[in-house]
Amino acid sequence: MSQGAKASSAITIDKLIKKFPLPGLGENFVVLHDISLTVDEGKFVSIVGPSGCGKSTLLNVIAGIESYDGGTVTIHPKGGRATAEPRIAYVFQSPRLLNWLTVENNINFVLEAQKVPRARWRELVAKNLEMVGLAGQERNYPLNLSGGMQQRVAIARALAIEPDILLMDEPFSHLDAITARKMRFDLMEILQRAKPTILFVTHDLSEAVFLSDSIYMMSTKPARIFKQVSIDIPRPRKPEDSTILDLEKTLVRDFFSVVEAQG
Amino acid sequence: MHGKLPLRKSKRGILPDPVRRMLPGALTLVAAIIVWKAISLAFIPIFFPGPALLVKRIIEIYSDPASYVVVGQTLARIFEGFVISMLAGMAIGLVMGLKRSIEIFFDSWIMVLLTFPAVCWAFLSVLWFGLSETAPIFTIVLIVVPYVAMNIWTGTKAVENGLIQMGTVYKANRFLMLRKVLIPQLMPYIFSSLRISLSLSWKIALVAEAFGVGSGVGQRLTYWFQETRVDMMLAWGVSFMIIMVLIDLLVFRSLSRRIFAWRPQFAT
């Protein structure tokens, strides 16, 4: 693993503000208050916060499916490709697959959307399904797969477009604990090969510590980032390693001291 | 939880399953035929034919090659009216679902069209288009389009926003979104529209033909009506109904089985 001393940033967010209108009150509810963060290229960065703190909204703003009211959001294409539009992939909480299309055609859908030449589709589908452990499922329909397998298809779909950044919104929260744990291990392994830049949102601190290079901790009311932690524990990691558990304990303490202080 | 759940034994009778499933329907049919026959005995056959006579008349009709021309004329009108209605209705329903301003515009028009008496359309078509091919098709289109539009419009309300978001994030263009995300979610609504509009179309076609086209099955019905031959009217009506039911079964059922193959309960 080459750890570049001067990593270039893939996402820069500066003083982002997002408000939702409150119906009938003529007032705006501030969802995101002065959020600033950077995600370096090739890094795994997590945002941890309680439910309803605006984490998903932040991802949606970055993904371009929600507007914002102040500050800047900049996404830099990989390796300083100044010309192209940055490619963004998104793994949602639920798989959000097109159930009427086969697994293969679900991936083809995003390849077509991203204008990837048709000649490459077969290879990209095969490679990414193999990576998530679903080789041979090309012709199957999503509803014949388990929840965990469907989420793997969603991950393969995201990786297939060779994204500059990969957004993940609590992708394992709908899965049972054992499947989720397996998926985390597999994700780590996949990332060793695919190496995209990841912004990962979760409410699970141990998940964040296990997976991330860096963690931003968010509080609610107002939603803001109150702490950033870099995690230099070498990979491959084990969730039960004492270094990981110790860090997790410290962070949990920090977290609740802030969240509970707010009442 | 404690205790044992009572095991539910599947009851197996002497009859094999398919026979048991068909039995109630078959019994109803037999009963209906017996009642029909009994009533028919009280009337003269041309006023209220019994089952055997009806079958005989139907065979007579379809032994005459000219009858196929008559049926063909009507089927062609139904087909044209049906196709135009489906395309127009789907287009209107879709844009209503996607564009708020168009929704407001069409909303009241659809209600007007839905409540306007069908028989008025039949009269108006004859007055406006005379004894032409346009008259019955125009009648079908005006009556069926609002049903289809309404149905598809309802379908657009049930579209899953999460999938639209997914498509948007991955930058699917409008056409791709329509083809792969929107239309498939509307398929159940499109299918119910297909079946409703076919059954409406053929009934309207017969009425329109009866009113004044001078050809087709509807015209045969008027003719035998003027001759007060109920047996011939029923023979035409019932046989045409059977043709339409067969089309529904053979075309739409098998088409829907294929299109909804992705649903696990359809897989074999």
Image (cartoon, helix red, strand yellow):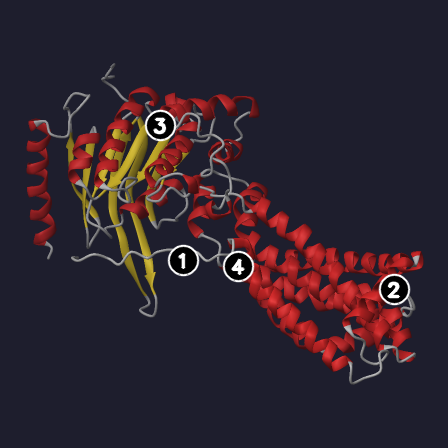
Tag in front: 3 or 1: 1
Tag in front: 3 or 4: 4
Query: For residue A132, which numbered disc appears in the image?
Result: 3
Secondary structure of the residue carrying tag 3 is loop
- Which of the 4 image quadrants contains residue A16? top left
Secondary structure of the residue carrying tag 1 is loop
Which quadrant would the N terminus of chain B be assigned to in this image?
A: bottom left
Q: CA distance from mark 4 to mark 2?
A: 41 Å
- Which of the 4 image quadrants contains residue B71? bottom right
Res A5 visible: yes
Q: Chain of mark 1?
A: B
Q: Residues within 10 Å of mark 3 (few under 14, many from 20)?
A: many
Q: Earlier in the sequence, mark 4 or mark 2?
A: 4
Q: Which residue is mark 4?
A: B20
Q: Which residue is mark 2?
A: B216
Res B101 visible: no
Query: For residue B11, which numbered disc appears in the image?
Result: 1
Position above or below: A209 against B41: above
